[in-house]
Image (cartoon, rainbow, N blue to C red):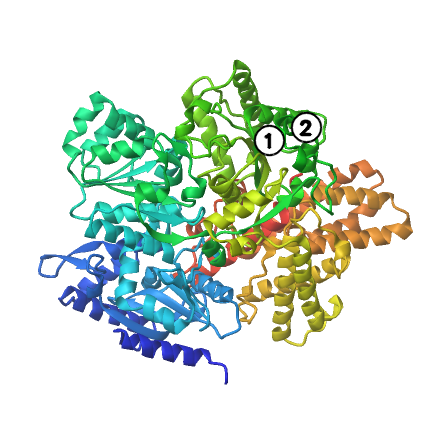
Amino acid sequence: MTKQSEAQLENNLIKQLVGLGYQNVTIPDGDTLVSNLKLQLEAFNNTTFSAKEFETILNHLAKGNVFEKAKTLRDRFNITRDNGDSFYVRFFNSEDWTSNLFQVTNQITQEGTYKNRYDVTLLVNGLPLVQIELKRRGLEIKEAFNQINRYQRHTFWSNHGLFQYVQLFVISNGVNTKYLANNKLQSVKQTFFWADVNNKNITDLTQFASSFLNPNHLGKMIAQYVVHNETHKILMVLRPYQFYATEQLVNQVTTGNDNGYIWHTTGSGKTLTSFKASQIIMDLPNVHKVVFVVDRKDLDYQTMLEFNSFKKDSVDVTDNTQSLVKQLTDDSKLVLTTIQKLNNAISKANYEKSLTHLQDKKVVFIFDECHRSQFGETHKKITEYFNSSQLFGFTGTPIFKDNASKNDLGKRTTKDLFGQCLHKYVITDAIKDQNVLRFGIEYVGKYKQKGNTLIDIEVEAIDTAEVFADEKRLEKIADYMIAYHNQKTFNKDYSALFAVSNIETLIKYYDIFKRKKEAGEHDLRIATIFTYGTNEEDEDAQDYIPGDALPLAAEPRAQYKTSHTREKLDEYIEDYNQMYNTSFSTKDSQQFENYFKDLSKRLKEREKTTFQDKDRLDIVIVVNMMLTGFDAKKVNTLYVDKNLKYHGLIQAYSRTNRILGEQKSQGNILCFRNLKKATDEAITLFSNKEAIEDIILPPYEAIAEKFDDALKNLLDIVPTFQEVDNLPSETEELAFIQAFRRLLRAKNILESYTDFDWDDLGIDEQTFEDYKSKYLDLHDKVKNESQKHKTSILDDIDFELELIHRDQINVAYILQLLAKLKDAKSADAKAQKKAIIDMLSGDVELRSKRELIEKFIEENLPHISDVDAIQDEFERFWHEEKILALAKICEEEHLDQKQFKALIESYTDYGREPLRDDIFKCLDNRPSILKAREIGERILDKMKEFVQVFVSGMVG
């Protein structure tokens, strides 16, 4: 059977779409697109527009970026007609989405910076709302994704920016088909397979078209399930399980009064699902109000930020019970509160009087993380007080008979409280879909047979509290963490949490780390937070098994066992203040809350491109806080020295497994206790026994075998690294890139194991570095050729450079090597010089500086007699080269040097990429409209290259 060509794939798809109710139209270029838009808008609005009226509509449609245009699409536009009448133009009907007009076309050509031809475009009322890119079989889906990004840069903005109305992209090679929102910030990790209600992926293009692209479903997705994220000003789209859960909830409210719960695993985006459900349910005619309930004060704030990012001002935090009562009685349709305030409102006589009129109204309660909070009296009180209430719960780890705790009401499971599970998406589903990562778990201690356990950490048979709290043991664990922290976190590029058993042990650990830091044994930035006493008297309010040391946080109680604990906490917060120039304390609850928010934000914001290293926090030591409901993508490691089980264990581990780019391939868990049995039991309870190997990374040896397979594949293509230069064509170069990338991915995972050792592998480190250098040469070649407007099959290949980025080698390190080189005997000097040049070639950051550093070695180093003067001389040389390079760009592009320098500084200090207008202000003459975009992009590229060479990596 011959392979299906792209053209066949395209024609079959169009034929299928016509069968589903699309009209097939021929639109070869931008002008035809505009004239078709006029006809479709006239038909949709049941009118005709004069040329002048349509010109007004086109000008309105051309305004704004992708995010603003998504709002324009859903709004009406008021025009004054030629005869003076007022008329509202609609572009899309969100209430009755089947009444929109659906068309399909292919091979539209648009001209922008380059000429692009798009595969298949779906038009709704004449506007291109879905763009489908097809790739030949055998290419990774990622390549189609990169092609879309290129179109956005090159041509989507041209021709009134009509292609910026695209809401969704679909990418497919026939066998694998994914969809994504039009959002230039996202990575290929935010592309999703569609699935059926049981989470079975629908990957084949024909089946995908039937279930996803039929006008009824696609219309509904665009009308209801594309979300505008106000914080980042981007579009988001729901994943299939989020869609089905929301539909089930809406259906449950529309058709009856039964309760229910949604089981979606931790990290799968429950907040977005619950927001979407709340938003649709609150607009249903029979619903009086939706009350969204969280069980902790910090989550109240976090959820408010997220809800308001999905829809501006959709909720307000209820600061106290009084403000909650006010929102329950006014016309707010959506109320966000904590379970404690809700409990007060319906229990205390003075509040309760104001609420009696709500007792018979249909109020829908949605409980977030319902495994934690509903096991006290509150659940009973709500159901008794609100006669027509309907209760829904969201949880990643439901309570079953096995992990239920006992209170006055007996053992209560999630099913007892909420009824049937309406939709399920468990951890194995999420790992299969790459929505969360697997865990790499290492048990450190006596029972570890082999490997790099430097220390004999006592565990296992002597599980007594005294042994666990023994200072010598804690000291060894601290040494172990210091030894391996860089390896686990890619040289502090990620942060870690350290979960310990109680506040006393936490204090001991913190003091050990502090003492070691003062003695110069490490430079880790460590903070801690604890507020709760151990709450022995309050087991009902917790969801752990009585007698098991596993409390999880409820509303913060500033309840310290002794004044000593309180003083210690103040001392630690003062250390934090010194480190980050802040001024928090435990003097009052507000100050303390602000400390918690600042610490959380420090971890959360690491993923931002503008994050600066001075704000980095490496390890946070906790007892319970942050082990549930806390999300930060740049946390990739959890150190554990406490007993965890069931939902507490899965929740804690899940702090590490949020998806972020290629480098973060798993969540690292380092256990200093033997939690193997507890881990297996928890995974079995929340998925099934067979799932253990899907959820946990295989042992080091198995990954080493994968590395060997990838290496064999590479050596079959290029037996030596020198042969990369002799590859006859781009097809062979592509094969080499794909083979080496596979090797890189395997090495990235291997390196996170403490057992990692080059001696175990079939290639030595130097040879690997030589291959890597050739790989980077090809990356540079592709980059340069695409700037020269050459097209190439390598254009859309993702080199995954983040897998190579390593921070140990910076300019300061190179200067130390230069000092050694200066002192070396001539025989050694040659080898040392080669080693320095090789190192420069193999580091992504330093590669761009290679030519200049070589120039310094050749021309300046021989004339420096004093080794101590090398740094000053290098800085002077660098400064001069920087001035020359800046002057060269300004001369070539006719830029005002002072203004352009200010733009560069704003970009390097704050990460603000200049707007095209800012660049044009630096030019002697503003370019013509036709040339503007090309010139703007060219100058921006030169600016970024200048920063890459002279600024990035120059600190330290």
Report the residue marked by disc 1. 526
Q: Nearer the viewer, residue 410 or 524?
A: 410
Q: Taking the image as drawn, is residue 490 in sight?
A: no
Q: Residue pushed farthest bottom?
A: 1
What's the amino acid at mark 2?
A: Lys
Pointer 1 local density, CA inside 10 Å: few below 14, some 14–19, many at least 20: many
856 or 6: which is nearer to us?
6
**Residue at point 16%, 66% (across, down):** 49
Mark number, residue 924: none
Residue type at tag 1: Ile
Q: Regarding mark 1 in the picture, which secondary structure is present there? A: strand
**Residue 933 image point, x, y percent:** 44, 60
Cβ atoms under marks 1 and 2 closer than 8 Å: yes
Reading the image, the residue beneath label 2 is 517
Tell me which label, 1 or 2, sits earlier in the chain.
2
Residue 80 image offset from top left, x and y in percent:
14, 56
Q: What's the residue at 68%, 74% (across, down)?
A: 727
**Percent from the top left, x then y, of residue 717?**
69, 72
